[in-house]
Image (cartoon, helix red, strand yellow):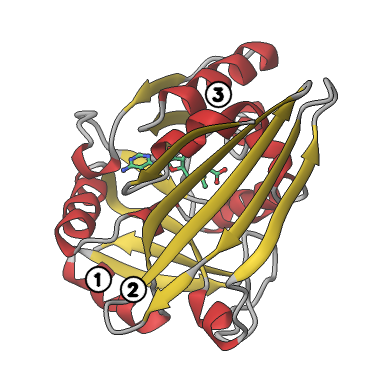
Amino acid sequence: MRFSGSERSQAHGRWYRTVAEHFDHLYDSGRVTRAYPFLHDLFRRRAPVLDVLDVACGTFALDLPLLRRSYRVTGRDVSKEMLRIARRRLEESGRSADLGQADMRTLRLDREFDAILCLGTAFNYLAKAIDIRRALRGFRGHVRKDGLLVLDLTNFDAWIRNPQNARAEVDYRAPDGMRIAVFGFNEQDLTRSIHLARFLTVVQTGRGIDIRFDEAPLRIWTKDSLTTALQGNGFKPVEWWGDLRLGARYDRRRSPRLVSVSTRA
Ligand SMILES: C[S@@+](CC[C@H](N)C(=O)[O-])C[C@H]1O[C@@H](n2cnc3c(N)ncnc32)[C@H](O)[C@@H]1O
């Protein structure tokens, strides 16, 4: 048994390194199937949307279905390991896309897109006001007038009302026999609007066991605080949803996600 590391960081960077290969199997696997109809319906209603930028694309799992249906998708992510998986998936799909490493706080693509996506809690990783401002201004500079910004956040309102702070989150067995177990023990600092996400991750390969501990502050957003941030940075919220799923109404107390759709003012 080996203690392979401990990190207190902004964005669980080393944790993604450990789990990148298996990330898509660790959490809700139906999510990818549900997200495409949601995004396609949104893009159709708010047409024309063809050129899409995903600023924290991870393994590109949510983007590949868009690519297969003729959207042009550009992906950026700060994690080399997540991008390595994304590139492999892209190659296997036989499609092509512009994938590269970038921090969403300092985007520089010198062009505008019809829509920007920031999905799967990635925007929650920006915990400091200055980072949030930088990112939103960067998003604004990369989306055409009346283009879309879609943020898919954890709905911490529901979480805080129904605390799930100590829980076994993952118990996964890979086809090659590798096992990954993730235990979460979180904490919320409501005065600072911060959720401290803490994971103990246990990876068993053969007879070897690696254990690591990671902690990252996530920003707690509510519909009101997000509206203020979006409006202050040149976006107008136009739709709210409770999940990346067709027809998932937003319910502050119950929805798993807080999904905002904004247009560039
Ligand atoms: C929970 S994953 C979600 C990935 C993907 N959007 C999805 O929904 O499947 C969060 C992703 O955000 C990325 N990330 C975190 N901070 C970032 C930053 N400042 N800039 C770009 N990517 C970031 C991580 O590397 C990771 O791939």
The quarter of the rendering in which ligand 1 is drawn is top left
Quadrant where the N terminus sits is top right
Q: Nearer the viewer, residue 258 or 37?
A: 258
Say what secondary structure mark 1 lies in. helix
Say what secondary structure mark 3 lies in. helix
Q: Residue 196 in the image: x percent, y percent?
A: 41, 65
Q: Nearer the viewer, mark 1 or mark 3?
A: 3
Q: CA distance from mark 1 to mark 3?
A: 30 Å
Disc 1 marks a residue whose amino acid type is: Ala
Give the residue at mark 2.
Answer: 226
Give the residue at mark 3.
Answer: 86
Q: Residue 217 in the image: x percent, y percent?
A: 36, 60
Q: Nearer the viewer, residue 234 or 29?
A: 29
Q: CA distance from mark 3 to mark 2?
A: 29 Å
Give the residue at mark 1.
Answer: 229
Graded by Cα atoms within 10 Å as few (under 14), some (14 to 19) or many (20 or more), the crowding at tag 1 reads some
Quadrant where the C terminus sits is bottom left
